[in-house]
Amino acid sequence: MTAASEALRRVGDVVWEIPASARPDMRVPARIFADEELLEAIRADRSLEQLENVACLPGIVDAALAMPDIHQGYGFPVGGVAATEPPDGVVSPEALVHEISRAVPAGAGKESLELDAAALEDVLRRGPRALVERFGIGTEDDLEHTESSGRLDGADPAAVSDRAHERGHAQLGTVGSGNHFLELQRVDEIFDAGTSAAFGLREGQSTVLIHSGSRGLGHQVCTDYVRRMDGVLARYGISLPDRQLACAPLTSPEGREYLAAMAAAANFAWANRHAMAHAVREAVARVVGRDAANGTRQVYDVAHNVAKLEPHGGRELCVHRKGATRAFPAGSPDIPADFRAVGQPVFIPGSMGTASYVLAGEPGAMERSFGTTCHGAGRRMSRTGARRRIGGAELRRELETAGIVVRCPSNKGLAEEAPFAYKDVERVVDVVARAGLGRRVARLRPLGVVKG
């Protein structure tokens, strides 16, 4: 048992805490949302230790938080949340999945819409609006139903390295590899009729869930600034328990430039998902018909790796959500007008062979997690461990026997994302609901998946 596990204590029905007194360098407690079974899975890797390390960051307020899907990441655990304060229907699933896989390139290094330098800079500054106005890709309604309208203020393409520009110029509209995917689904059950109606969801309806981000551009931005900040830790008197948590004060030149580059990468990520959603609509038109495509609307697009300045408790805080998403409640001015009476849509995908959930943000999220919840079930097994247990070809056969169409160019990549490699999404969602972070709206069952 690790020192982090030994210090863990229960403070609520599904809330656990490591007090700040557990280590002399912890500034705030480390708080975990989980039940007993999920907690055992969480103890199996370094995520609790990493959460303690996050609790050591300068300027962190309240607590370092862990969603029920938390698992070990790079420095900052995936499913972690921290806030810091300045300064210091489908008629043919087979045919539609095939057409979507043709329309949306999947896999490492895949390219799609190629942008010249001016167009890429416009996307970095304005996000998907640049695609709507320059190329007619997507709609104004898509922008309305996107977190922050798909644009963070303060984005500066000049803060993004030439290498990041090179990696991103031809990757818009691509799903990438790893755990990113497009999944064709069916609404299996409605839990909240009023909220599901507000979201435009009904039982038996077909949906597409898109999970991707800023691709190589965002990865390069992160790499660039981790290196840069690692070199100035001593200048700002920052001592870290893990150098993977390299950081700089929000008001420092390095901090301001990173926020400008990160905002540009977030805008790129929203534009990437926007372009994929447009490609999905065109695939629907080719397979099902133009009327069906015109009726295919975006419910919501929410970021899952971002740091944003937000007001919380009368203070402006920089809220870091890594592998976690915003979950604002009813009444929030920061969500689309047609959702304000019910709360922001929240999506928690399970795995290729299980369910995904749509939830709505609840006031408890603002009180307990800076308006945040998890963005998936979370890994419980390493990619290597998954490959040792099953081969991609075998998994493909199992999924297709279960009626789930699979399009993935890599058997290795497919095996790494086997359903058993992830935590039980039902338990994860149960913890989110019991903790008051979100309420169940609908359950979605997979019909087909496109992965890299």
Image (cartoon, rainbow, N blue to C red):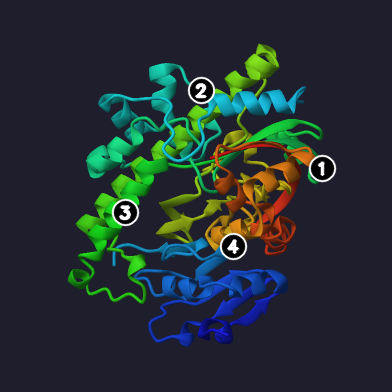
Q: Position of residue 109 (x, y in %)?
A: 41, 38
Q: Is 227 situated above or below 121?
A: below
Dot 4 falls on a residue whose secondary structure is helix
Mark 2 residue type:
Gly
Dot 1 falls on a residue whose secondary structure is strand
Residue located farthest toward the top when viewing the structure as drawn = 290
**Label 1 environment density (alpha carbons within 10 Å; few <14, some 14–19, many ≥20):** some
The first of marks 1 and 2 along the sequence is 2
The first of marks 2 and 3 along the sequence is 2
Task: Please state, as top left, top right, bottom left or bottom right, where the N terminus lies in the image.
Answer: bottom right
* Cα separation between marks 1 and 3: 42 Å
* Cα separation between marks 4 and 1: 33 Å
Which of labels 2 and 3 is toward the front?
Answer: 3
User: What residue is disc 4 on?
Assistant: 385
The first of marks 3 and 4 along the sequence is 3
Q: Is 28 situated above or below 449?
A: below
User: What residue is disc 3 on?
Assistant: 223
User: What residue is disc 2 on?
Assistant: 138
* Cα separation between marks 1 and 2: 29 Å
